[in-house]
Image: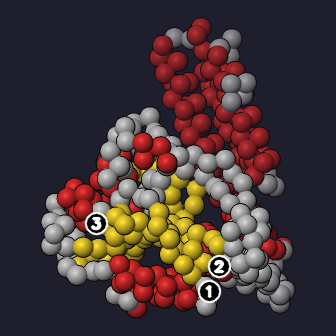
Protein backbone atom coordinates (compact mmCIF):
# COMPACT_ATOMS: atom_id res chain seq x y z
CA UNK A 1 0.00 0.00 0.00
CA UNK A 2 1.31 3.44 -0.93
CA UNK A 3 1.94 6.01 1.76
CA UNK A 4 -0.04 9.24 1.83
CA UNK A 5 3.01 11.11 0.59
CA UNK A 6 3.35 8.76 -2.36
CA UNK A 7 -0.30 9.34 -3.30
CA UNK A 8 0.09 13.11 -2.99
CA UNK A 9 3.16 12.87 -5.24
CA UNK A 10 1.19 10.80 -7.73
CA UNK A 11 -1.57 13.43 -7.82
CA UNK A 12 1.02 16.17 -8.29
CA UNK A 13 2.49 14.20 -11.18
CA UNK A 14 -0.96 14.00 -12.79
CA UNK A 15 -1.26 17.78 -12.50
CA UNK A 16 2.16 18.26 -14.08
CA UNK A 17 1.37 15.89 -16.98
CA UNK A 18 -2.02 17.48 -17.53
CA UNK A 19 -0.47 20.96 -17.57
CA UNK A 20 2.14 19.91 -20.13
CA UNK A 21 -0.27 18.08 -22.41
CA UNK A 22 -3.12 20.60 -22.28
CA UNK A 23 -0.82 23.58 -22.82
CA UNK A 24 0.77 21.93 -25.86
CA UNK A 25 -2.55 21.14 -27.57
CA UNK A 26 -2.67 22.55 -31.08
CA UNK A 27 -6.38 22.90 -31.57
CA UNK A 28 -9.65 22.85 -29.63
CA UNK A 29 -10.50 19.25 -30.60
CA UNK A 30 -7.16 17.94 -29.36
CA UNK A 31 -7.46 19.98 -26.17
CA UNK A 32 -10.92 18.61 -25.43
CA UNK A 33 -9.99 14.98 -25.95
CA UNK A 34 -6.88 15.35 -23.72
CA UNK A 35 -8.93 17.11 -21.05
CA UNK A 36 -11.39 14.20 -20.98
CA UNK A 37 -8.48 11.81 -20.37
CA UNK A 38 -7.57 13.71 -17.20
CA UNK A 39 -11.02 14.25 -15.77
CA UNK A 40 -13.27 11.53 -17.17
CA UNK A 41 -14.35 8.33 -15.40
CA UNK A 42 -11.36 6.38 -16.68
CA UNK A 43 -8.78 9.07 -15.84
CA UNK A 44 -5.70 8.47 -13.69
CA UNK A 45 -7.04 10.79 -11.02
CA UNK A 46 -10.20 8.73 -10.69
CA UNK A 47 -8.08 5.58 -10.48
CA UNK A 48 -6.22 7.04 -7.49
CA UNK A 49 -9.45 8.03 -5.75
CA UNK A 50 -10.92 4.60 -6.43
CA UNK A 51 -8.36 2.98 -4.16
CA UNK A 52 -8.62 5.21 -1.08
CA UNK A 53 -11.24 3.10 0.75
CA UNK A 54 -8.47 1.28 2.66
CA UNK A 55 -7.09 4.50 4.20
CA UNK A 56 -8.16 6.09 7.49
CA UNK A 57 -10.78 8.81 7.40
CA UNK A 58 -8.13 11.44 8.24
CA UNK A 59 -6.04 10.28 5.29
CA UNK A 60 -9.11 10.11 3.01
CA UNK A 61 -9.81 13.77 3.80
CA UNK A 62 -6.28 14.81 2.80
CA UNK A 63 -6.37 12.80 -0.44
CA UNK A 64 -9.87 14.06 -1.25
CA UNK A 65 -9.07 17.72 -0.78
CA UNK A 66 -5.80 17.36 -2.71
CA UNK A 67 -7.51 15.72 -5.64
CA UNK A 68 -10.27 18.38 -5.70
CA UNK A 69 -7.66 21.10 -5.74
CA UNK A 70 -5.88 19.41 -8.66
CA UNK A 71 -9.16 18.91 -10.56
CA UNK A 72 -9.86 22.64 -10.27
CA UNK A 73 -6.36 23.54 -11.41
CA UNK A 74 -6.65 21.24 -14.45
CA UNK A 75 -10.00 22.86 -15.22
CA UNK A 76 -8.43 26.33 -15.07
CA UNK A 77 -5.62 25.29 -17.40
CA UNK A 78 -8.19 23.86 -19.81
CA UNK A 79 -10.32 27.03 -19.76
CA UNK A 80 -7.37 29.34 -20.37
CA UNK A 81 -6.02 27.19 -23.21
CA UNK A 82 -9.44 26.87 -24.83
CA UNK A 83 -9.86 30.63 -24.86
CA UNK A 84 -6.45 31.06 -26.40
CA UNK A 85 -7.07 28.43 -29.11
CA UNK A 86 -10.52 29.82 -29.94
CA UNK A 87 -9.02 33.28 -30.46
CA UNK A 88 -6.33 31.86 -32.71
CA UNK A 89 -8.88 29.88 -34.74
CA UNK A 90 -11.14 32.89 -35.09
CA UNK A 91 -8.20 35.01 -36.22
CA UNK A 92 -7.22 32.32 -38.74
CA UNK A 93 -10.75 32.28 -40.12
CA UNK A 94 -10.66 36.03 -40.67
CA UNK A 95 -7.21 36.20 -42.20
CA UNK A 96 -7.10 32.76 -43.89
CA UNK A 97 -9.98 33.42 -46.31
CA UNK A 98 -10.40 37.17 -46.45
CA UNK A 99 -13.62 38.65 -47.82
CA UNK A 100 -13.02 39.87 -51.33
CA UNK A 101 -14.77 43.20 -51.56
CA UNK A 102 -14.15 43.41 -55.31
CA UNK A 103 -16.41 40.44 -56.24
CA UNK A 104 -19.55 41.81 -57.91
CA UNK A 105 -22.76 41.28 -55.90
CA UNK A 106 -25.54 38.87 -56.87
CA UNK A 107 -27.95 40.41 -59.31
CA UNK A 108 -31.42 40.55 -57.76
CA UNK A 109 -33.84 40.82 -60.62
CA UNK A 110 -36.31 43.61 -60.14
CA UNK A 111 -39.91 42.41 -60.31
CA UNK A 112 -43.19 44.23 -59.96
CA UNK A 113 -46.38 43.94 -57.94
CA UNK A 114 -48.60 40.91 -58.41
CA UNK A 115 -51.32 41.79 -60.96
CA UNK A 116 -54.08 41.31 -58.37
CA UNK A 117 -52.40 43.69 -55.93
CA UNK A 118 -51.58 46.20 -58.67
CA UNK A 119 -55.19 46.34 -59.93
CA UNK A 120 -56.53 46.34 -56.37
CA UNK A 121 -54.44 49.39 -55.51
CA UNK A 122 -55.62 51.07 -58.70
CA UNK A 123 -59.24 50.41 -57.70
CA UNK A 124 -58.69 51.65 -54.13
CA UNK A 125 -57.20 54.89 -55.53
CA UNK A 126 -60.12 55.29 -57.90
CA UNK A 127 -62.74 54.80 -55.19
CA UNK A 128 -60.87 57.08 -52.77
CA UNK A 129 -61.07 59.82 -55.37
CA UNK A 130 -64.87 59.45 -55.17
CA UNK A 131 -64.89 59.69 -51.38
CA UNK A 132 -64.96 55.96 -50.56
CA UNK A 133 -63.09 54.92 -47.45
CA UNK A 134 -61.42 51.51 -47.22
CA UNK A 135 -62.46 49.25 -44.34
CA UNK A 136 -61.58 45.69 -43.43
CA UNK A 137 -63.31 42.80 -41.70
CA UNK A 138 -62.38 39.35 -40.43
CA UNK A 139 -61.90 36.46 -42.87
CA UNK A 140 -63.28 34.01 -40.31
CA UNK A 141 -66.81 35.23 -39.81
CA UNK A 142 -69.89 34.40 -37.77
CA UNK A 143 -72.92 33.08 -39.65
CA UNK A 144 -74.72 36.15 -38.31
CA UNK A 145 -72.62 38.62 -40.28
CA UNK A 146 -72.06 36.30 -43.23
CA UNK A 147 -75.76 35.41 -43.64
CA UNK A 148 -78.41 36.50 -41.15
CA UNK A 149 -77.60 40.21 -41.08
CA UNK A 150 -77.62 40.16 -44.89
CA UNK A 151 -81.20 38.94 -45.07
CA UNK A 152 -80.23 35.28 -45.53
CA UNK A 153 -81.81 33.57 -42.48
CA UNK A 154 -80.99 30.00 -41.44
CA UNK A 155 -83.03 27.37 -43.32
CA UNK A 156 -83.78 29.88 -46.08
CA UNK A 157 -83.07 28.29 -49.50
CA UNK A 158 -80.99 31.35 -50.48
CA UNK A 159 -78.30 30.11 -48.13
CA UNK A 160 -77.66 27.13 -50.39
CA UNK A 161 -76.46 29.44 -53.17
CA UNK A 162 -73.20 29.97 -51.28
CA UNK A 163 -71.00 26.90 -51.26
CA UNK A 164 -69.87 27.40 -47.73
CA UNK A 165 -67.13 25.79 -45.68
CA UNK A 166 -68.27 25.46 -42.08
CA UNK A 167 -65.72 25.27 -39.27
CA UNK A 168 -66.23 22.90 -36.36
CA UNK A 169 -66.84 25.83 -34.00
CA UNK A 170 -69.71 27.09 -36.19
CA UNK A 171 -67.81 29.97 -37.78
CA UNK A 172 -67.37 30.26 -41.55
CA UNK A 173 -64.49 31.45 -43.70
CA UNK A 174 -66.49 34.35 -45.18
CA UNK A 175 -68.13 33.52 -48.52
CA UNK A 176 -68.20 37.19 -49.58
CA UNK A 177 -66.94 40.54 -48.40
CA UNK A 178 -70.59 41.55 -47.90
CA UNK A 179 -70.14 40.57 -44.25
CA UNK A 180 -68.11 43.79 -43.88
CA UNK A 181 -71.22 45.67 -45.05
CA UNK A 182 -73.24 44.27 -42.17
CA UNK A 183 -70.49 45.08 -39.65
CA UNK A 184 -70.00 48.60 -40.96
CA UNK A 185 -73.73 49.42 -41.05
CA UNK A 186 -73.93 48.48 -37.39
CA UNK A 187 -71.23 50.81 -36.13
CA UNK A 188 -70.34 53.54 -38.61
CA UNK A 189 -71.79 57.00 -38.45
CA UNK A 190 -74.14 57.75 -41.36
CA UNK A 191 -73.88 58.73 -44.16
CA UNK A 192 -70.81 56.90 -45.51
CA UNK A 193 -69.18 55.38 -48.56
CA UNK A 194 -66.90 52.39 -48.06
CA UNK A 195 -65.05 49.75 -50.02
CA UNK A 196 -63.89 46.50 -48.45
CA UNK A 197 -61.44 44.41 -50.44
CA UNK A 198 -60.38 40.98 -49.19
CA UNK A 199 -60.19 37.23 -49.55
CA UNK A 200 -63.27 35.01 -49.56
CA UNK A 201 -63.70 31.25 -49.52
CA UNK A 202 -66.11 28.81 -51.10
CA UNK A 203 -66.43 25.09 -51.40
CA UNK A 204 -65.66 24.98 -55.13
CA UNK A 205 -64.12 22.41 -57.43
CA UNK A 206 -61.10 24.23 -58.88
CA UNK A 207 -61.20 24.94 -62.62
CA UNK A 208 -60.25 27.75 -65.01
CA UNK A 209 -62.83 30.16 -63.58
CA UNK A 210 -63.39 28.88 -60.02
CA UNK A 211 -61.09 28.68 -57.01
CA UNK A 212 -61.82 27.85 -53.38
CA UNK A 213 -60.24 31.19 -52.44
CA UNK A 214 -60.75 34.42 -54.34
CA UNK A 215 -60.55 38.18 -53.92
CA UNK A 216 -63.60 40.35 -53.77
CA UNK A 217 -64.17 44.06 -53.35
CA UNK A 218 -67.32 45.14 -51.62
CA UNK A 219 -68.72 48.64 -51.97
CA UNK A 220 -71.46 50.34 -49.98
CA UNK A 221 -72.84 53.85 -50.33
CA UNK A 222 -75.43 54.96 -47.76
CA UNK A 223 -77.10 58.35 -47.64
CA UNK A 224 -80.56 59.87 -47.46
CA UNK A 225 -81.18 60.19 -51.18
CA UNK A 226 -79.04 57.57 -52.92
CA UNK A 227 -80.67 56.37 -56.13
CA UNK A 228 -80.25 53.56 -58.60
CA UNK A 229 -78.89 56.05 -61.10
CA UNK A 230 -76.00 56.79 -58.66
CA UNK A 231 -75.19 53.11 -58.65
CA UNK A 232 -75.25 52.92 -62.44
CA UNK A 233 -73.16 56.02 -62.87
CA UNK A 234 -70.48 55.03 -60.38
CA UNK A 235 -70.18 51.43 -61.58
CA UNK A 236 -70.00 52.42 -65.24
CA UNK A 237 -67.19 54.83 -64.33
CA UNK A 238 -65.51 52.02 -62.40
CA UNK A 239 -65.52 49.69 -65.38
CA UNK A 240 -64.22 52.46 -67.64
CA UNK A 241 -61.47 53.21 -65.16
CA UNK A 242 -60.36 49.64 -64.51
CA UNK A 243 -61.01 47.97 -67.84
CA UNK A 244 -61.09 50.80 -70.35
CA UNK A 245 -64.01 51.69 -72.63
CA UNK A 246 -66.20 48.58 -72.80
CA UNK A 247 -69.81 48.06 -73.71
CA UNK A 248 -71.78 47.46 -70.50
CA UNK A 249 -75.30 46.43 -69.62
CA UNK A 250 -77.32 46.03 -66.42
CA UNK A 251 -79.76 43.18 -66.06
CA UNK A 252 -81.98 42.13 -63.17
CA UNK A 253 -80.64 39.51 -60.76
CA UNK A 254 -81.56 38.13 -57.36
CA UNK A 255 -79.38 38.64 -54.30
CA UNK A 256 -81.09 38.47 -50.90
CA UNK A 257 -79.37 41.60 -49.54
CA UNK A 258 -80.44 43.96 -52.35
CA UNK A 259 -83.75 45.04 -53.82
CA UNK A 260 -83.75 45.50 -56.74
CA UNK A 261 -80.71 43.37 -57.57
CA UNK A 262 -78.66 43.78 -60.74
CA UNK A 263 -75.71 42.34 -62.56
CA UNK A 264 -73.36 44.58 -64.46
CA UNK A 265 -72.07 42.75 -67.55
CA UNK A 266 -69.41 43.83 -69.97
CA UNK A 267 -69.01 42.75 -73.54
CA UNK A 268 -66.86 39.62 -73.66
CA UNK A 269 -63.21 40.63 -74.03
CA UNK A 270 -62.28 37.26 -75.46
CA UNK A 271 -64.66 37.20 -78.44
CA UNK A 272 -65.69 40.85 -78.77
CA UNK A 273 -69.34 39.93 -78.15
CA UNK A 274 -69.62 37.27 -80.88
CA UNK A 275 -69.92 34.46 -78.32
CA UNK A 276 -67.31 31.97 -77.10
CA UNK A 277 -66.76 29.25 -74.53
CA UNK A 278 -65.77 31.69 -71.80
CA UNK A 279 -68.92 33.84 -72.10
CA UNK A 280 -71.01 30.69 -72.67
CA UNK A 281 -71.88 32.05 -76.12
CA UNK A 282 -73.78 35.01 -74.70
CA UNK A 283 -71.24 37.65 -75.71
CA UNK A 284 -71.39 39.10 -72.17
CA UNK A 285 -69.44 38.49 -68.97
CA UNK A 286 -70.87 39.25 -65.54
CA UNK A 287 -68.46 41.42 -63.55
CA UNK A 288 -70.26 43.30 -60.79
CA UNK A 289 -73.31 41.98 -58.91
CA UNK A 290 -74.98 44.99 -57.30
CA UNK A 291 -78.26 46.55 -56.19
CA UNK A 292 -80.05 48.83 -53.75
CA UNK A 293 -79.58 47.77 -50.11
CA UNK A 294 -82.55 45.65 -48.97
CA UNK A 295 -84.66 47.35 -46.26
CA UNK A 296 -84.23 44.26 -44.06
CA UNK A 297 -80.44 44.70 -44.07
CA UNK A 298 -80.93 48.25 -42.77
CA UNK A 299 -83.40 46.99 -40.15
CA UNK A 300 -80.95 44.34 -38.88
CA UNK A 301 -78.41 47.12 -38.34
CA UNK A 302 -80.93 49.34 -36.56
CA UNK A 303 -81.21 51.88 -39.41
CA UNK A 304 -84.58 53.22 -40.55
CA UNK A 305 -84.97 52.22 -44.25
CA UNK A 306 -87.48 55.03 -44.71
CA UNK A 307 -84.83 57.56 -43.79
CA UNK A 308 -81.72 56.08 -45.40
CA UNK A 309 -81.08 54.33 -48.69
CA UNK A 310 -78.00 52.90 -50.25
CA UNK A 311 -76.47 50.78 -52.93
CA UNK A 312 -74.01 47.94 -52.66
CA UNK A 313 -71.82 45.96 -55.03
CA UNK A 314 -69.39 43.05 -54.80
CA UNK A 315 -66.75 42.81 -57.50
CA UNK A 316 -65.07 39.50 -58.12
CA UNK A 317 -61.64 40.99 -58.14
CA UNK A 318 -59.75 38.11 -59.70
CA UNK A 319 -62.21 38.26 -62.58
CA UNK A 320 -61.51 41.97 -63.13
CA UNK A 321 -57.80 41.10 -63.38
CA UNK A 322 -58.58 38.27 -65.86
CA UNK A 323 -60.58 40.62 -68.04
CA UNK A 324 -58.05 43.43 -67.83
CA UNK A 325 -55.21 41.21 -69.02
CA UNK A 326 -57.13 38.73 -71.19
CA UNK A 327 -56.20 35.83 -68.92
CA UNK A 328 -58.43 32.85 -69.61
CA UNK A 329 -57.35 30.68 -66.66
CA UNK A 330 -57.70 32.09 -63.16
CA UNK A 331 -55.31 29.52 -61.68
CA UNK A 332 -52.21 31.08 -63.21
CA UNK A 333 -52.68 34.11 -60.96
CA UNK A 334 -52.02 31.92 -57.94
CA UNK A 335 -49.24 29.65 -59.18
CA UNK A 336 -46.39 32.03 -58.43
CA UNK A 337 -44.77 31.41 -61.82
CA UNK A 338 -42.62 34.49 -62.42
CA UNK A 339 -42.31 33.77 -66.16
CA UNK A 340 -46.06 34.21 -66.44
CA UNK A 341 -46.68 36.86 -63.78
CA UNK A 342 -43.78 38.96 -65.12
CA UNK A 343 -45.73 39.56 -68.33
CA UNK A 344 -48.38 41.76 -66.78
ZN1 LIG B 1 -66.94 35.48 -75.35
Asked whether the residues under the numbered discs 1 and 2 touch, taking CB atoms below 8 Å apart as contact, a structural biologist would say yes
Earlier-in-chain disc, 1 versus 2: 1
Q: Residue shown at 75%/52% (left/top)?
A: 28
Q: Residue shown at 33%/55% (left/top)?
A: 150
Q: Pointer 2: what residue?
A: 267
Please determine whether, in this image, residue 321 is positioned above or below residue 202.
below
| Secondary structure found at label 1 | loop
* Label 3 to label 1: alpha-carbon separation: 32 Å
Residue ranking furthest to the top = 54
Residue 51 in view here: yes
* Label 1 to label 2: alpha-carbon separation: 7 Å
Please tell me how crowded label 2 is: few (under 14), some (14-19), or many (20+) other residues with Cα within 10 Å. many
Q: Pointer 3: what residue?
A: 184
Q: Residue shown at 67%/39% (left/top)?
A: 15
The foreground one among 151 and 204 is 151
Q: How is the image coloured?
A: secondary structure
Q: Residue 285, image x and y in percent?
A: 63, 71
Q: Residue 245, image x and y in percent?
A: 61, 91
Q: Pointer 1: what residue?
A: 246
Residue 179 in view here: no
Q: Residue 215, image x and y in percent?
A: 54, 65
Please tell me how crowded label 1 is: few (under 14), some (14-19), or many (20+) other residues with Cα within 10 Å. some
Quadrant (top left/top right/bottom left/bottom right) for the N terminus = top right
Amino acid sequence: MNTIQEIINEIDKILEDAGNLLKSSENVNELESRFRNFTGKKSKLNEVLHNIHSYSSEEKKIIGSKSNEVKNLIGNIYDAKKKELSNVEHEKLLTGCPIDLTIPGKNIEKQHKHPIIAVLEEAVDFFSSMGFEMVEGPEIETTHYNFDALNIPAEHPARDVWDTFYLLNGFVPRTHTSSVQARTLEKKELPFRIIAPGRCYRYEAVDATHLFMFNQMEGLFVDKNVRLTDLKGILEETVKNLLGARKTRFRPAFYPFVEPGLDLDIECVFCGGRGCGICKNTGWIEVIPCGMVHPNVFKYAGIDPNEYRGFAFGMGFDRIVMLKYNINDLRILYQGNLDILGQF
